[in-house]
């Protein structure tokens, strides 16, 4: 298949691009704005593949989208492009509205004009928090943060293009991803790098919030499965095999890195913090997908990857991220 992968220079988008090039023989054109989270380093190992192209630009820019479509003549658009950090959405929601609302609209119009299949990558956060039980695709949408509210708006717009124009669009909603190439503002890579550097491990609130962890390679395969065999107009949840409280994750990272318990610091809670996410994945399992990586082994491999790939994270930790960290946590990195 010829694919236009928007946001393919980010964590999950680059995992998906790598998987489709290596395991499916697809042609991949990436369109990415290269925000702070998008990095060409994320495709260092396939940048020279003749079936791969990169166009720099924003999905909200119709000229950039037209250029990428011209370059790759795709059969489908897979949209990962997003602002993805909840804390940043609380501090500065602006870019979240532009990328999720306007950006998704521009891509949908392009898909309509060129008669392309369209897959929107979405999140379990659109359902809000659940104390007990698990969300299905029928659960009401109840987002809590500017991040999840704008992602929800994008999902609704995608569904309206199916209902109104018959656009063959599908949505795949994932739970919390982890794995290589994840920007260290997110819980797992932040804790790994801080643990390795002897920095503090900032736990929000009581640390008993629960997340449903999925390895990025499993989420990327779920997206591929939905792209290939999902029914137009449908939503598919893809949740990971394990749920863990944040404190359990931090404790495990301390064990794996040889850090000290004394590095843990309870800090001010995130405003509007969702307590628990949990997704039922029965519908995507019925298409033939299942997760392959259990959390214990995936976390161990992830810690090993960050240990061995300082070339990837050193420029981040010594760059703009330092200032972000200081603003967010009120303390400096070592
Ligand atoms: P990421 O922050 O690592 O990457 C986002 C990418 O989008 C970056 O390369 C960035 O440069 C690009 N981008 C941002 N705004 C853009 C714009 N206007 N135009 C073009 N490119 C733009 O994010 P990620 O964790 O890889 O998430 C990818 C997608 O998966 C997002 O849609 C996110 O909502 C969804 N998702 C993420 C998770 C998770 O746990 N990380 C879970 C479920 C769903
Ligand atoms: O559930 C899917 C979502 O998972 C994605 O849609 C988002 O793009 C992605 O960022 C992620 O959102 P979370 O808010 O769950 O992830 P984050 O890594 O920011 O936080 C995970 C949990 O850890 C959450 O309960 C907040 C907590 N946390 C986070 C950070 C960064 C801390 O306790 N300390 C921290 O320093």
Image (cartoon, helix red, strand yellow):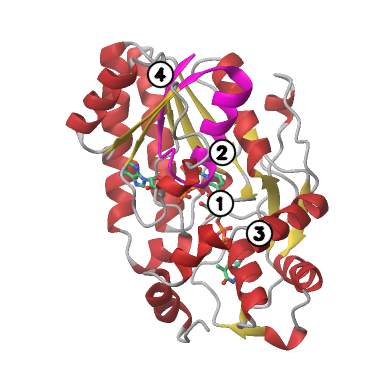
Identify the residue shown where x is 81% and y is 72%.
255
Q: CA distance from mark 4 to mark 3?
A: 45 Å
**Tag 3 or tag 1, which sits nearer the N-term?**
1
Nearer mark to the viewer, of 1 and 3: 3
Q: CA distance from mark 2 to mark 1?
A: 8 Å
Nearer mark to the viewer, of 3 and 2: 3
Please give the residue where the numbered disc 1 appears in the rendered image.
181
Q: Secondary structure at mark 3?
A: helix
Q: Is the CB of the residue bearing disc 1 within 8 angstroms of ligand 1?
A: yes
Across and down, in percent, residue 235 comes to: 56, 28
Please give the residue where the numbered disc 2 appears in the rendered image.
15
Query: Going by the image, does 265 lie left or right of 170?
Result: right
Point out the residue furthest to the front here: 48
Across and down, in percent, residue 160 comes to: 37, 25
Across and down, in percent, residue 2 comes to: 44, 16
Q: Say the numbered circle drawn on residue 308.
A: 3
Query: Going by the image, does 103 lie left or right of 126?
Result: left
Nearer mark to the viewer, of 1 and 4: 1
**Tag 1 or tag 2, which sits nearer the N-term?**
2
Identify the residue shown where x is 63% and y is 84%.
266
Nearer mark to the viewer, of 4 and 2: 2
Depicted 150 relative to depicted 210: above or below: above
Nearer mark to the viewer, of 4 and 3: 3
Q: Say the numbered circle drawn on residue 162.
A: 4
Q: Is the CB of the residue bearing disc 2 within 8 angstroms of ligand 1?
A: yes
Asked whether the residues under the numbered discs 2 and 1 touch, taking CB atoms below 8 Å apart as contact, a structural biologist would say: yes
């Amino acid at each position: 298949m010829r694919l236009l992968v928007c946001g393919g220079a980010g964590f999950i988008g680059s995992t998906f691009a790598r998987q489709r090039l290596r395991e499916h023989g697809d042609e991949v054109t990436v369109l990415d704005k290269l925000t702070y989270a998008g990095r060409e380093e994320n495709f260092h190992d396939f940048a020279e593949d003749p079936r791969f192209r990169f166009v720099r630009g924003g999905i909200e820019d119709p000229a950039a989208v037209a250029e990428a479509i011209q370059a790759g003549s795709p059969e489908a658009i897979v949209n990962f492009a997003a602002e993805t950090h909840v804390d940043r959405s609380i501090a500065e929601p602006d870019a979240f509205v532009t990328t999720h609302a306007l950006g998704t609209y521009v891509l949908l119009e392009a898909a309509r004009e060129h008669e392309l299949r369209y897959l929107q990558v979405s999140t379990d956060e659109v359902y809000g928090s659940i104390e007990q039980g698990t969300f299905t695709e029928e659960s009401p949408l109840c987002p809590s943060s500017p991040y999840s509210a704008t992602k929800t708006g994008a999902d609704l717009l995608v569904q309206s293009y199916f209902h109104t124009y018959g656009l063959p669009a599908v949505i795949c909603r994932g739970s919390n991803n982890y794995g290589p190439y994840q920007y260290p503002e997110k819980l797992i890579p932040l804790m790994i790098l801080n643990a390795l550097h002897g920095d503090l491990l900032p736990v929000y609130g009581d640390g008993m919030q629960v997340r449903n962890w999925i390895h990025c390679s499993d989420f990327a395969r779920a997206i591929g499965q939905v792209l290939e065999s999902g029914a137009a107009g449908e939503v598919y949840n893809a949740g990971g095999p394990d749920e863990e409280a944040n404190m359990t994750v931090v404790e495990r990272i301390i064990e794996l890195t040889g850090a000290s318990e004394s590095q843990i610091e309870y800090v001010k809670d995130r405003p509007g913090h969702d307590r628990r996410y949990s997704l039922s994945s029965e519908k995507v399992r019925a298409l033939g997908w299942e997760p392959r990586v259990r959390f214990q082994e995936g976390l161990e491999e992830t810690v090993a990857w960050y240990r061995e790939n300082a070339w990837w994270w050193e420029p981040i930790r010594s760059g703009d991220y330092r200032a972000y960290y200081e603003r967010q946590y009120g303390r400096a990195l070592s």
